């Protein structure tokens, strides 16, 4: 499923990325990151693109979105329980970390702003099974072939992930 964000949304993502990085004092080589050898400018762009991918999912479901609305993993990226994972590579994989919430649904988005492909979804609890554990990193990796088509999420038993939280 291909979806687009607007120029205004792109600007908001860039502003949110700069604010987050400055406020938290993050650097590209922060200990929580896997890809630590990028320039600072690339790091800002990558953070903005990740927000843009989240916004693309929000647009797809007709949900409101604000970049960096969650300071940690206490809230979903989108809706009630959607954790958006972004890859700039069309054939990229979905990566899950220990901090990803077990009750969430992970959605993989691929591409570059403003056009994204919403690739598919998987419950985080299933993505954290041993068969997806990465051999050299303390994470889980799910290839696209193991994801459910995004069009099936609304009809699944995980459809509640799409709903809005009452205080959003």
Image (cartoon, helix red, strand yellow):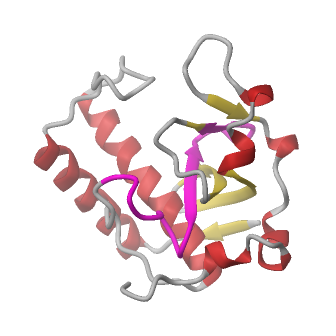
Q: How many marks?
A: 0
**Residue found at x 20% / y 44%:** 21
**Residue found at x 73% / y 76%:** 159
Residue toward you, 106 or 116: 106
**Residue found at x 53% / y 52%:** 101
Which quarter of the rendering shows the N terminus?
bottom right
In the drawing, does residue 131 fall left or right of residue 85? right
- 139 w.r.t. 26: above or below: above
In the rendered structure, does residue 77 fall within the stretch colored magenta? yes
Which quarter of the rendering shows the C terminus?
bottom left
Residue 109, position as x, y percentages in the image: 64, 53
**Residue found at x 61% / y 59%:** 103
Look at the magenta stretch and give its main secondary structure. loop
In the drawing, does residue 64 fall left or right of residue 15? right
In the rendered structure, does residue 37 fall within the stretch colored magenta? no
Q: Which residues are magenta?
A: 72-95
Residue 127, position as x, y percentages in the image: 71, 42
- 107 w.r.t. 141: above or below: below
Residue toward you, 31 or 125: 125
Residue 28, picture quadrant? top left
Residue 22, picture quadrant? top left
Residue 82, position as x, y percentages in the image: 58, 64
In the drawing, does residue 124 fall left or right of residue 84? right
Residue 20, position as x, y percentages in the image: 21, 52
């Amino acid at each position: 499923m291909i979806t687009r964000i607007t120029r205004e949304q792109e600007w908001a993502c860039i502003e949110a990325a700069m604010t987050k990085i400055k406020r938290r004092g993050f650097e590209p080589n922060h200990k929580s990151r896997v890809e630590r050898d990028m320039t600072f400018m690339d790091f800002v762009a990558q953070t903005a693109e990740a927000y843009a991918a989240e916004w693309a999912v929000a647009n797809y479901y007709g949900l409101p979105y604000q970049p960096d609305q969650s300071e940690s993993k206490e809230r979903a990226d989108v809706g009630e329980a959607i954790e958006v994972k972004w890859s700039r590579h069309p054939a990229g994989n979905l990566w899950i970390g220990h901090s990803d919430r077990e009750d969430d649904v992970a959605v993989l988005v691929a591409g570059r702003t403003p056009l994204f492909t919403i690739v598919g979804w998987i419950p985080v609890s299933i993505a954290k099974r041993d068969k997806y554990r990465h051999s050299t990193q303390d994470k889980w990796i799910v290839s696209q072939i193991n994801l459910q088509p995004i069009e099936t999420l609304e009809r699944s038993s995980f459809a509640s992930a799409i709903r809005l939280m009452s205080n959003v």
